[in-house]
Amino acid sequence: MSKFTKDDIIYTSDSEVKRFSHLIKNMVIDLISAKQLAYTLMTRDIKAQYRQSALGIIWAFIPAIATALTFTLASQSRLINLGTTNIPYPAYIIFSTALWQTFTEAVLGPINGVTAAKDILSKIKFPREALILAKLGEVIFNFGIKLILIIGVFIWYGLPVNVLTILAPFAVLNLILFGFGIGMLLAPLNVLYSDISKGITILLGFGLFLTPVVFPMPEGNGVFAQIVRMNPITYLLLGIRELTLNGNLVNSFVYTGITVFNIFLLLLSWLFYRLSMPFIVERAS
C-alpha cells in the first residue's frame, strides 16, 4: 500500500510548463475549489476592517470628500488652474477619486493579501488562488460602499444618467481587473522583497497626477498631455465616466485595445503567480 496520501506534495523533475494543458486544467480546478475559503477570508478581512471603528464605512467616503474639498478650495482660490470639467467640479473629483481609490486597492490587494499569509503558506496546503479571490471580493465590496457616495453625489447635483449606464459596472470591473493583473504579478516578489510594496505605493501616489482624476483630460500636444494620453488607466477611467454620464465611449478603439491587453495581463499574471509561489514559499520559509 502506498504511504502517500492525496494531500502530500510530490516533487518531480517534470516542469508544469511542459504539460501546459494539464497546468491550465489544475489552475481552473483550484480556482473553483478556492471559492469557499476565499469567501471565509474575505468576510474575515472585511469584519476586521470595520471592527473597533466608530466611523465604520464613513472611512470609505472620507478620502474622496477630503480630496474634493482640498482641490475645490484651491481651484476657487485660483491657486491652481485645473481646467473645466463637464460636470460640477466637486462631483467630478469625488466620482474620479472613488474610482482611483478602487484601482489602488485592486493593485495593493493581492500584494498585501499574499504577504499577510506568508507565515501560513509554508505550513498549510490550500489553493493559493483563494488569497487572490478573497481580495477581489473585498475590493468589489468596498467599491459597493463607495457607490453609495457616488449615487448621493449624482442625486445632489442632479446629474443625468443614460440607459447605457448599466454598462458602467463592467467598465469598473475592467479597471479592477487591470489593477489585479499588476498586483498579482508583483505579489510573489513582495514576499521576498518588501521594496515592491513601498515602491508601488509611491508610484500610485505619483500616478494620481498622471491620470485625469483631479483634472480633466488635458488638451494640446505638450509633454504632460502626451504622458497622460499614454497612460492606459486614463482610458479605463474615462470609459467609466463616459458610460455613466453619456452612455458612449469616445475612445472606443483605444479602450477595446486596452481591454484585450488587460485580459492577457490577467492571464499572464495568474500563470506567473501560480508557477512562482512554490519557489517563493520555499525561499521565504
Image: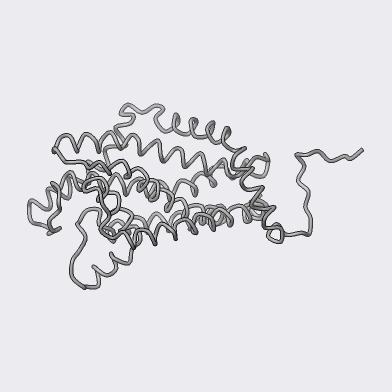
| In-front residue for pair 76/94 | 94
Q: Nearer the viewer, residue 139 or 190?
A: 139
The residue under the point 21% across, 60% down is 217
Q: Point out the image quarter for the N terminus.
A: top right
Q: Is residue 206 visible?
A: no
- Which residue is the extreme one toward the right? 1
Left or right of 202, for residue 137: right
Percent of width and height locating residue 178: 42, 53
All told, the count of numbered labels is 0
**In the image, 277: left or right of 250?**
right
Measured along the vertical axis of the image, is residue 247 above or below residue 207? above
Relative to 68, 196 lies left or right = right
Above or below, comparing residue 218 to residue 28 in the picture: below
Residue furthest toward the left?
A: 77
Q: Residue furthest front?
A: 163
Q: Position of residue 37 (x, y in %)?
A: 58, 34
* Residue 215 picture location, percent across and down: 20, 56
What's the residue at 8%, 51% (across, down)? 76
> Going 40% across and 39% down the picture, which residue do you hit?
140
Please give the name of the residue rendered at 14% of the width and 48% of the height, measured from the top-left corner: 87
Question: Compared with residue 248, is residue 50 higher up or lower down, i.e. above or below?
Answer: above
Image quarter for residue 156?
Answer: top left
Q: Position of residue 207 (x, y in %)?
A: 32, 59
Given residues 201 and 12, the one toward you in this image is 12
Q: From this viewpoint, is residue 121 visible?
A: yes
**Colouring rule applied to residues:** one colour
